Image (cartoon, rainbow, N blue to C red):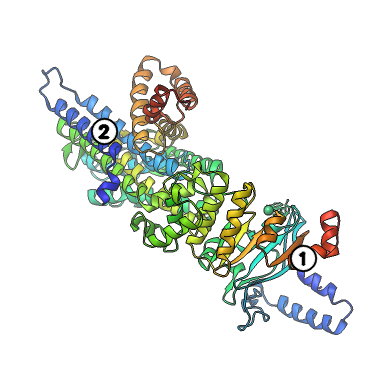
């Protein structure tokens, strides 16, 4: 029953493609270095990073595509998950840091701090950190969303305040006194659960976990969006007042989706940090969040897999573009966005349908 | 020396100008009240049902002295109206008379500046929010048809069905929760049985209006508020709607706002004429048409 509901053609295609992709990459990574298909750690981590962005895009699509909540600050939740993970990795460094201080991370020693701030308590316990990875963004989304949705802030106003939220966080995290490494963020990680973070085994494991997390998050979103609750989402998106007048408490519907979405974004951030090796306040930059929204729009919103396609496509291009023509990346992204909005309103994921229509000679 | 009375207290005192005993009494009471520290003052919000809402009468909806103003403009001005259980009441009145605003007040979308609104003796509508008002049994159709365009007709009706509507209930519910027979019956009633899987956005204007009425019926409300349900319908669609309403009469109480006089004549027993935010006349269609105040209101200015 549930299986029939969740696993439609596109979901089966998505899960099998993602799993196959992950298997191939992992296989190539584990081939001997002399082999023609060998992938080095750097490439595997880069692909893992794309998967984390895909998780973030997926979480944006859940609220934007299904509920019409355009969050321009989802990078904040990604960043929170990332910082929690970063704190754990900092503690793992132990006395292998520059100052060889077993208690304090290097930047705290540098600031002449004598002890860990209270909010670093428990950051050395991996299970606790795993809990915080979803709890911190989830709670933040709850605290932010409850008053916003209750007072019926929506549309552009909501987008603006989400943007303001992430901007405020960025400014706060830039300050050294916050205790998160300020400008430089958290970096120089050595190990995760005792295993060398740069070892091939760890790199491949993190990559595989990212793929698994993406598939799981996708399925959770599918279960929800194909349930009656998913139809309530669409009802809220299409006619909010009508939904309220047939008895749905729209603010809680939005809040639930927003919190879940933040949790998914947080998981993305937590997997991103060990693969990239650094987290700094840049993740809270409004530009990053907007770029992720553009990914979703390019991929096609309201389909889940569209967001994933968009995130992968844009970041592949970005990696290439920012090495070839670093100065014009943003112009290029803007132009891409305009072109897709004009000619492919349903995004890349809508391409097959658009082509089919064109072939059948019908005007779209 | 005299405390800051709020506008309606000043109004009250002004209106008692020629009854000095009573005025002194009221003044004393008010001054006593204001002499207490702010936090100690008893709540003045009326919570007991109004006296004329006795247990033995059949009043379902009770609106008394409702005033709503937008930036000083009085959209409703001391509107008083009672609707009985089982009644089909038509509200007519020129554009801007306040008909939609009245529905907004009943459904909790707009809060009146003053007045009372009760739904039976149990529910003080001014204390409930939109969702709670829906749950006590008032369903409302908007003036502009409003359905969930991306969902099928069946899913539109299913979402509206009476039942638990919390986030978790919705997550657990299977695709078409219970009441399948009632859903079929409703589909037939609104004449959309052949369009059950059509996306609501693809329906004609008239069909959307029916679908919205169908969604209200799924909630099994005690009182249906219909704001211009036949606007933009073809004559044959209007006829079908007349049939539908006559079919519903007796099962549900209905308040119908309408411009189309033919339609009103076809369905209404009792008509209320609204003008400049208050009730100008009430009676059968014949009585209304002979009422000189109504005639002048429709021709031009009138006082109420
Ligand atoms: N939200 C609002 N803000 C300001 N004026 C409003 C608002 N809603 C209604 N009005 C005004 O109140 C009057 C009554 O409107 P309405 O109840 O829609 O009339 P009707 O439905 O009888 O045509 C109109 O003059 C309208 O302009
Ligand atoms: Mg109106």
Alpha carbons under labels 2 and 1: distance apart: 81 Å
Which of the two residues, B33 or A174, is positioned nearer the viewer here? B33
Q: Secondary structure at mark 2?
A: helix
Q: Position of residue B94 (x, y in %)?
A: 76, 54
- Is residue A271 something that shows in the picture? no
The correct choice, above or below, for A251 with respect to B3 in the image is above
Tell how many labels: 2
Q: Position of residue B80 (x, y in %)?
A: 72, 69
Residue wearing tag 2: A275
The correct choice, above or below, for A349 with respect to B238 in the image is above
Q: Secondary structure at mark 1?
A: helix
Q: Position of residue A127 (x, y in %)?
A: 23, 51
Quadrant in the rendering for residue A107: top left
* Tags 2 and 1 on a common chain: no
Residue shown at the point (59%, 63%) measured from the top left: B246
Residue shown at the point (56%, 76%) measured from the top left: B122
Mark 2 packing: few (<14 Cα in 10 Å), some, or many (20+)?
A: many
Residue wearing tag 1: B286
Residue shown at the point (26%, 40%) measured from the top left: A215
Mark 1 packing: few (<14 Cα in 10 Å), some, or many (20+)?
A: few
Residue shown at the point (75%, 61%) measured from the top left: B274
Quadrant in the rendering for residue B268: bottom right
- Would you say B9 lies left or right of A215 here? right
Q: Position of residue B74 (x, y in %)?
A: 76, 58
> In front: mark 2 or mark 1?
1
- Is residue B263 something that shows in the picture? yes
The correct choice, above or below, for B42 with respect to A310 in the image is below
């Amino acid at each position: 029953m549930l299986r029939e509901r969740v696993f439609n053609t596109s979901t089966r295609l998505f899960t099998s493609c993602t799993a196959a992709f992950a298997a191939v990459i992992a296989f190539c990574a584990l081939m001997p270095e002399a082999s023609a298909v060998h992938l080095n750690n750097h490439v595997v981590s880069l692909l893992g990073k794309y998967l984390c962005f895909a998780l973030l895009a997926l979480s944006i699509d859940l609220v934007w595509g299904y509920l019409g909540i355009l969050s321009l600050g989802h990078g904040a939740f990604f960043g929170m998950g990332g910082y929690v993970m970063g704190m754990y990795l900092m503690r793992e460094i132990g006395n292998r840091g520059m100052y060889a201080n077993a208690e304090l991370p290097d930047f705290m020693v540098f600031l002449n701090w004598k002890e860990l701030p209270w909010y670093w308590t428990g950051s050395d316990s991996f299970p606790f950190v795993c809990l915080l990875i979803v709890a911190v963004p989830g709670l933040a989304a709850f605290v932010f969303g409850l008053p916003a949705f209750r007072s019926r802030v929506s549309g552009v106003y909501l987008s603006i305040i989400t943007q303001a939220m992430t901007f405020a966080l960025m400014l706060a995290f830039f300050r050294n006194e916050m205790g998160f490494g300020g400008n430089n963020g958290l970096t120089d990680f050595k190990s995760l659960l005792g295993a060398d973070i740069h070892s091939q085994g760890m790199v491949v494991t993190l990559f595989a976990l990212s793929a698994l997390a993406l598939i799981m998050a996708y399925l959770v979103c599918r279960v929800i969006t194909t349930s009656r609750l998913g139809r309530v989402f669409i009802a809220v998106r299409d006619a909010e007042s009508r939904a309220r007048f047939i008895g749905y408490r729209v603010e809680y519907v939005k809040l639930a989706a927003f919190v879940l979405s933040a949790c998914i974004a947080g998981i993305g951030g937590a997997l991103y940090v060990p693969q990239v090796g650094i987290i700094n306040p840049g993740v809270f930059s409004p530009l990053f969040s907007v770029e992720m929204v553009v990914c979703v729009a390019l991929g096609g919103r309201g389909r889940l897999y569209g967001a994933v396609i968009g995130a992968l496509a844009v970041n592949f291009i970005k990696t290439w573009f920012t090495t070839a023509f670093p100065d014009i990346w943003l112009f290029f992204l803007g132009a891409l966005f305009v072109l897709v909005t004009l000619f492919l309103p349903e995004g890349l994921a809508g391409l097959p349908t658009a082509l089919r229509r064109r072939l059948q000679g019908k005007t779209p | 020396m005299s405390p800051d009375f709020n506008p309606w207290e000043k109004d009250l005192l002004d209106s008692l100008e020629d009854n000095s005993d009573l005025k002194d009494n009221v003044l004393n009471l008010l001054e006593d009240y204001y002499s207490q520290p702010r936090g100690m003052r008893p709540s003045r919000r009326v919570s007991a049902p109004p006296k004329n809402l006795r247990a033995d009468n059949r009043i379902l909806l009770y609106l008394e002295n409702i005033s709503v103003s937008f930036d000083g403009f009085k959209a409703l001005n001391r509107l008083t109206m009672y609707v009985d259980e089982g009644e089909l009441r038509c509200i007519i009145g020129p554009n801007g008379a306040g008909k939609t605003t009245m529905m907004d007040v009943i459904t909790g979308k707009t809060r009146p500046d003053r007045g009372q609104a009760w739904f039976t003796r149990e529910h003080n509508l001014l204390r409930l929010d939109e969702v709670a008002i829906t749950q006590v049994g008032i369903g409302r159709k908007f003036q502009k048809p409003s359905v969930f365009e991306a969902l099928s007709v069946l899913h539109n009706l299913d979402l509206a069905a009476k039942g638990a509507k919390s986030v978790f209930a919705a997550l657990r519910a299977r695709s078409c929760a219970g009441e399948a027979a009632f859903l079929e019956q409703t589909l037939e009633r609104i004449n959309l049985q052949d369009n059950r899987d059509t996306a609501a956005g693809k329906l004609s204007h008239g069909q959307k209006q029916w679908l919205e009425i169908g969604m209200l019926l799924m909630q099994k409300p005690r009182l249906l508020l219909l704001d211009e349900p036949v606007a933009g319908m073809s004559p044959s669609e209007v006829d079908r709607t007349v049939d539908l309403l006559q079919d519903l009469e007796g099962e549900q109480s209905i308040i119908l706002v309408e411009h189309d006089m033919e339609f009103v004549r076809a369905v209404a027993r009792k008509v209320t004429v609204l003008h400049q935010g208050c009730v100008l006349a009430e009676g059968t269609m014949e009585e209304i048409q002979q009422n000189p105040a109504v005639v002048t209101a429709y021709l031009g200015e009138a006082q109420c």
